[in-house]
Image: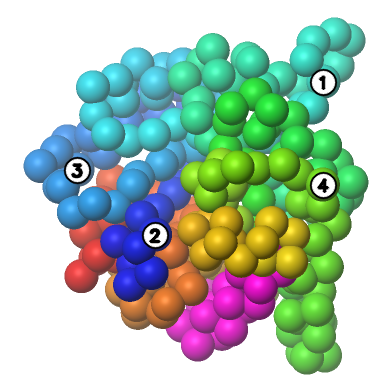
Amino acid sequence: MTQNNRTLLIAGNWKMNNDVQAAATLADELVAALDGVDNGVEVLVCPPTIDLTTVAAKLDGSAIKLGAQNVYWEAAGAYTGESSCDMLKSAGCTYCIIGHSERRDYFHETDEDQNKKAKALVAAGLVPVFCCGEPLEVREAGTYVEHVVAQVKAGLEGLEIADPAQLVVAYEPIWAIGTGMTATADDAQEVCAAVREALADLFGAELASGIRVLYGGSAKPGNIAELTAKPDVDGALVGGASLKAADFSQMVVKSAE
Ligand SMILES: O=C[C@H](O)COP(=O)(O)O
């Protein structure tokens, strides 16, 4: 638990890594590495869509949750290459990442797209892990808080939740993703606190105080404890370090120390 009574969440985003066999192996390794770890930290892995059912079978009986990396908001139909909320649920998912900067940059996804995805996920009973974060030029211009708050408000406007567990937000400064340039814990705290204020504007202070806000961007075993020690950082969305069971499981342990 954090000092604010929110359950810490350590989430692994495998991105486009691991074929079905490699995903099965990593899932087995994770289950083994986390066996007996009972420190109150919630653990989530988000493999590529093609790996979901295989990983779900491997996680069965463990406390590790399953999430997807993308979703389409329509229920069914002629949307080649896409997966619906119900499809993700049928594969065993309870969470889904949306709005990752890689989706926004490489696949031209907009705030409006994230808004439709968030609403479809919540309506289906899935929890969006809504990503936001600024590029380097915005950080250097000093307008990063405004940038991130605008993303949160546009992406989550009109979303209806009754329980804080229905939503997770991940602050991921783009300049820190996969670069080894981790934001300092103070940087993370500053923006995560601003995200929580934006959530209070959207959903009211009480709900906002229970919504988990994660940090993402070169989070690793060596810096996770410092990050989660901050009052508004409720865990991490982990890319590279989630691909090694030893590193990821160490992060689960260290996040609560
Ligand atoms: O979704 C995860 C983030 O993009 C962070 O990736 P990273 O830990 O490899 O920097």
Residue 183 visible, this orientation = no
Could you say which quadrant of the image residue 198 lies in? bottom right
Q: On the rendered structure, is 188 left or right of 141? A: left
How would you rate the neighbour count of disc 1 (Cα within 10 Å): few for under 14, some for 14-19, many for 20 or more?
some
Query: The residue tagged with tag 3: helix, strand or loop?
Result: helix
Looking at the magenta stretch, what is its main secondary structure?
helix
Which color scheme is applied?
rainbow
* x and y, in percent, of residue 108 in the image: 88, 47
Cα–Cα gap, marks 3 and 1: 36 Å
Q: Say which amino acid is labelled 1.
A: Glu
The residue that label 3 is drawn on is 34
Q: Between disc 4 and disc 1, whose residue precedes?
A: 1
Q: Say which amino acid is labelled 4.
A: Gly
How would you rate the neighbour count of disc 2 (Cα within 10 Å): few for under 14, some for 14-19, many for 20 or more?
many
* x and y, in percent, of residue 168 in the image: 56, 51
Vertical relation: 11 (above or below) 57: below
Query: Can you tell which mark lies on residue 74?
Result: 1
How would you rate the neighbour count of disc 3 (Cα within 10 Å): few for under 14, some for 14-19, many for 20 or more?
many
Closer to the observer: label 3 or label 4? Answer: 4
Between 74 and 138, the one lying in front of the other is 74
Query: The residue tagged with tag 2: helix, strand or loop?
Result: loop
Query: Can you tell which mark lies on residue 158?
Result: 4
Q: Between disc 3 and disc 4, whose residue precedes?
A: 3
The residue that label 2 is drawn on is 6
Between 32 and 236, the one lying in front of the other is 236
Q: Between disc 1 and disc 2, whose residue precedes?
A: 2
Cα–Cα gap, marks 2 and 3: 21 Å
